[in-house]
Image (tube, helix red, strand yellow):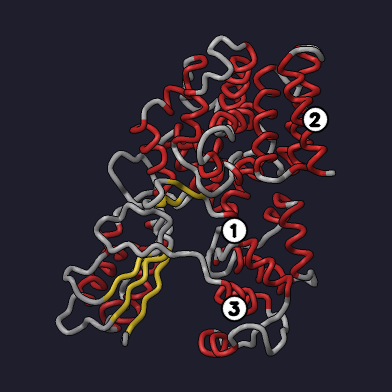
Amino acid sequence: MFSFVFWLSAKSERTLKVGLTKVAERVLEKDQHRMLGSEDENRAIKQVREWLSKPNNNRWLLIFDNYDDPQTSGEKNVNSFKIKNYFPYTSQGSILITTRRTRLTYAKIIQLKKLETEQGLALLAQRSKRPGAEQGLNTSFFLKYFNINSWTDVDARKLQDRMDGLSLALATAGDYLRQTSNSFAEYLKRYEKNWQDLQKNMHELSEYEGHTLYTTWNLSFSEIKAQNHRAVFLLQLMTYFDNQEICFDLPQKGIDCERLGKSDYGLKMRWKQMLKAFHKTHEKTNIEPFGLSWFTDLMSNKSRVDAALITLQDYSLVEPHHESGKYSLHACVHDWTLDWLNQEVRPGLLWLAIHCVACSMVANSVPLYWESNRSLDSHALRFQHPRLKRAIAETELSKGEFADLHTIGYLDNLQDRSQKSVEMYQQALRGAEKALGFEHHLTLDILINLGNAYRRIG
């Protein structure tokens, strides 16, 4: 189909110019490029663009790889440049641009989706070079696309599922496994238990020079911080929710909730904790929160939330779902937000997330309450993550915190997670007894619900 395919690194204008001068050495006549030196670089690039524009010379493919710093209005980045300045002078041939950004409006955007199970296993098999059985998967798929055999390795499937079809994560895992004697199960265990240590010791992929799985997102995060501090805050808050079915209404309920009362001391202290933790993390930025109104200032204005989400979408960190009006993060991105962006759990953000979920729960006395609570189920389970669970247990609960835990326990109980509801009720009860005393009606309410949960367990 193509007579020529030119693969050029566009991670910087410098690497692109170097690549184009090498193209000049390939396609231009010897007398045209023989005298070329560093001072003639621009002339060589001009000649390549002219060569690509020649009549009937249209069977070529030009690939600009890793163009992650496009020059767009409103952004200030010393490394950004306009890639169109290096296009041919005429509209012919084929051009492919790979990028993390989504604002290249002059091109047809093809969003790469996660791999299907067979595709993910095929990539894992190819990169890890591990032997497998001759059964289980569609062998013809492998032979056709990868010329390798299929697997029945259960742990390989578990690893593929945990990486959720993210090609970069699977390729990274495969390369690591090829270079070590670790099994798929061992790699998955290290990923779950020692994410930071595992990522720090990863080598960059040969075809993705200068980047590993987490450094790619770190780079995006640095650029986001320079553009929209609200997007930074929103991404860090998303850490403490589940990565699916995140909607604008969820944190909005945390603002609108009147259950605790506007003058509640515990709620005010939680706002202070959240702001202090966030401000400490970004003390070098120009963020000036206005007391307790910082979060409400963001969430009470839908346009500001949209602007923050658009920034996160532009760097492919969140994905919108237009039919439901909700957003999601890929599972591996979600892992990175907790294990890298939040290496130490931020109590203010954690309790803010708990408060938002608690305020969104609908009591079972309301018709069709289960439909409203179904979307909260995964968010309540998020608080069972070992690091978050430990942070909750270490908190000296105020009235606001133990009331929220009581509600999360109630939600767990409605979803037939009696053991988890017992754990939440127990922590809420300890906080209530200390803050209000054993005979207070709120303490007794928690005690009654705890007893009912024990009865359901049997």
CA–CA distance between discs 1 and 2? 42 Å
Amino acid type for the residue under numbered disc 2: Gln
- Label 1, label 3: how many angstroms apart (C-alpha)? 21 Å
Tell me if 255 is positioned left or right of 417 in this view: left
Locate residue 321 relative to residue 192 in the image: left or right. Answer: left
Q: Please state the horizontal and vertical placement of residue 367, each as a whole percent of the image.
A: 51, 37
Q: CA distance from mark 3 to mark 2?
A: 47 Å
Q: Which residue is mark 3?
A: 122
Specify the quadrant that holds the C terminus: top right
Q: Nearer the viewer, residue 151 or 206?
A: 151
Q: Viewer-nearest of labels 1 and 3?
A: 3
Callout 3, which amino acid?
Answer: Ala
Q: Which residue is mark 1?
A: 212
Q: Are marks 1 and 2 in contact (CB under 8 Å)?
A: no
Closer to the camera, 246 or 63? 246
Which type of secondary structure does the marked residue at label 2 adopt? helix
Return the x and y of residue 171 as percentages of the image width and height: 60, 69
Quadrant of the image occupied by residue 425: top right
Front residue (pair 270, 194): 270
Q: Do callouts 3 and 2 mark residues in contact (Cβ within 8 Å)?
A: no
Q: Residue at x 70, y 80 (%)?
A: 152
- Going by the numbered disc 1, the residue's amino acid type is Thr
Mark 2, Cα crowd under 10 Å, few <14 / some 14-19 / many 20+, is some
Q: Residue at x 45, y 42 (%)?
A: 223
Q: In the shown orientation, is residue 165 left or right of residue 36?
A: right
Kind of element beneath mark 1: loop
* Marked residue nearer the N-terminal end (1 or 2): 1
Q: Which residue is mark 2?
A: 426
Q: Residues within 10 Å of mark 3 (few under 14, many from 20)?
A: many
Against 55, residue 49 (above or below) is above
Residue, far left: 55
